[in-house]
Image (cartoon, rainbow, N blue to C red):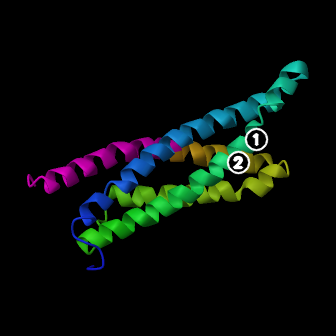
Amino acid sequence: MNFLPESIKPWLNFIHPVLMWVLLAMSIYALYLGVQIQRTRAAQGEEKKALIKGRYNVRHFQIGSILMALMVMGSIGAMAVTYINNGKLFFGPHLLVGLGMTGMITTSAALSPYMQKGQNWARYTHIILNMIVLGLFIWQAITGVQIVQRIVNSMMGNA
């Protein structure tokens, strides 16, 4: 791909890892908000009134929507950068797990209309999918750091 200056191409490799670390932090925050939603559902009286004021459900939905959009775009962008820089994708666990996570987070978000209608099966499926995504996200962060180390070594001529 010759439409980008060669001096820019290697630096494109760092957009995805930085974005994904931000998204990992956002995922942990979304988990916190989800737990607060559950606390609100279980609370009664004044405690419930106080928790409702936190608008955890609205904030969870907003953060989740942003998270899903950025994860999908980050996944597509990472594959594009890899192809631009190498002329191919590297088929391996990091790519496959990332694609699986992208599918799971979109499926989880697609359950929102059912959860809004009080369908507990959708709520439990949403929670399970997102816990799996969070666990895989942590694993992806570790393997991603290893990939970034290889890229940095290659950039420094140590490969």
**Can residue 123 be seen in this snapshot?**
yes
- In which quadrant will I find the N terminus? bottom left
Identify whether 88 is placed above or below 124: below
Whole-percent x, y for residue 95 in the image: 37, 60
Magenta span covers which residues?
134-159
CB of mark 1 within 8 Å of CB of mark 2?
A: yes
Q: In the displayed structure, does residue 130 sit left or right of residue 119?
A: left
**Can residue 125 be seen in this snapshot?**
no
**Which residue occupies 26% across, 80% down?**
2
Identify whether 115 is placed above or below 56: below
Q: Secondary structure at mark 2?
A: helix
Q: Which label was assigned to residue 57?
A: 1
**Which residue occupies 71% across, 31% down?**
36
Query: Which is more toward the observer, 77 or 39?
Result: 77
Q: To which residue does mark 2 refer?
A: 61
Amino acid type of the residue that numbered disc 1 sits on in the rendered structure: Asn
Q: Main secondary structure of the magenta part?
A: helix
Choose top left, top right, bottom left or bottom right for residue 56: top right
**Which residue occupies 47% across, 44% down?**
22
**Which residue occupies 59% across, 46% down?**
130
Give the CA separation, mark 1 to mark 2: 6 Å
Estimate how packed mark 2 is, as few (under 14), some (14 to 19) or many (20 or more) residues with alpha carbons within 10 Å: some
Give the residue at the far bottom of this rendering.
2
Q: Secondary structure at mark 1?
A: helix
Identify whether 62 is placed above or below 2: above
Estimate how packed mark 1 is, as few (under 14), some (14 to 19) or many (20 or more) residues with alpha carbons within 10 Å: some
Give the residue at the far left of this rendering.
158
Amino acid type of the residue that numbered disc 2 sits on in the rendered structure: Phe
Q: In the displayed structure, does residue 32 sit left or right of residue 84?
A: right
Whole-percent x, y for residue 51 in the image: 80, 27
